[in-house]
Image: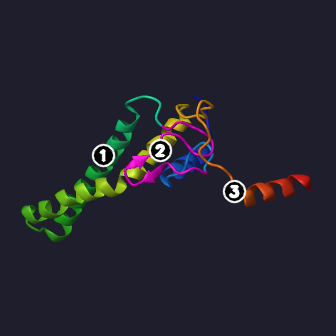
Amino acid sequence: MRSHKPAYLAHKLKTGFRLRCPHCEHGRLFDRWFHMREICPYCQSRFERSSGDAIAGIYINVALAELIAIAGFFAVHEVFSPPIMLQLAFWLPFIFVFTLLFYPYARGLWTAILYLTGGIYADPDYDREYIASDEILAGRASFENE
């Protein structure tokens, strides 16, 4: 793994959190909320090369949900002192809902981490999914002629 500046690392993590391909920063990681693309439609980077890559994103998701819930539980208990059953009635569903809503973002962060460690790169074995429209190609041709 190459050594990178902290600003570069933060930028790539932010790109993953924005659900964009960390390699080209244009392609979307997800086509539906729970369905991650196999490859980037722009640069052909394969997002999941081995069968355990998704698990770390799930670990990030669950760990963050639990940390927020535990910190929230103790903060609310310290300030308001509600009954524990009332707290559990709020924080247990919170963990469930948070993990559902944060899932793509956790996977995006993990994809960026995989990219930074060299696990994601362009894969020329795949055909390009993205086909530029005629307007884009005409604009590119006129730009190149200038």
Q: Is residue 13 above or below residue 51?
A: below
Residue highlighted by disc 2:
37
Q: Magenta span: helix, strand or loop, mainly?
A: loop
- What is the number of callouts on the image? 3
Q: Which residues are magenta?
A: 26-47
Q: Earlier in the sequence, mark 2 or mark 1?
A: 2
Front tag of 1 and 3: 3
Q: Quadrant of residue 79?
A: bottom left
Residue highlighted by disc 3:
133
Q: Is residue 117 above or below residue 69?
A: above
Could you tell me the amino acid type at mark 2? Answer: Arg
Could you tell me the amino acid type at mark 3? Answer: Ser
Q: Is residue 92 above or below residue 42?
A: below
Q: Earlier in the sequence, mark 3 or mark 2?
A: 2
Residue highlighted by disc 1:
63
Q: Quadrant of residue 84?
A: bottom left
Report whether 114 appears left or right of 96: right
Image quadrant where one finds the C terminus: bottom right
Residue at the location (53% across, 36% down)?
Answer: 46
Q: Position of residue 63 (x, y in %)?
A: 30, 46
Which residue is at the far bottom? Answer: 80
Q: Secondary structure at mark 2?
A: loop
Q: CA distance from mark 2 to mark 1?
A: 24 Å
Q: Secondary structure at mark 3?
A: loop
Callout 3–callout 2 Cβ contact below 8 Å: no
* Magenta-colored stretch includes residue 39: yes
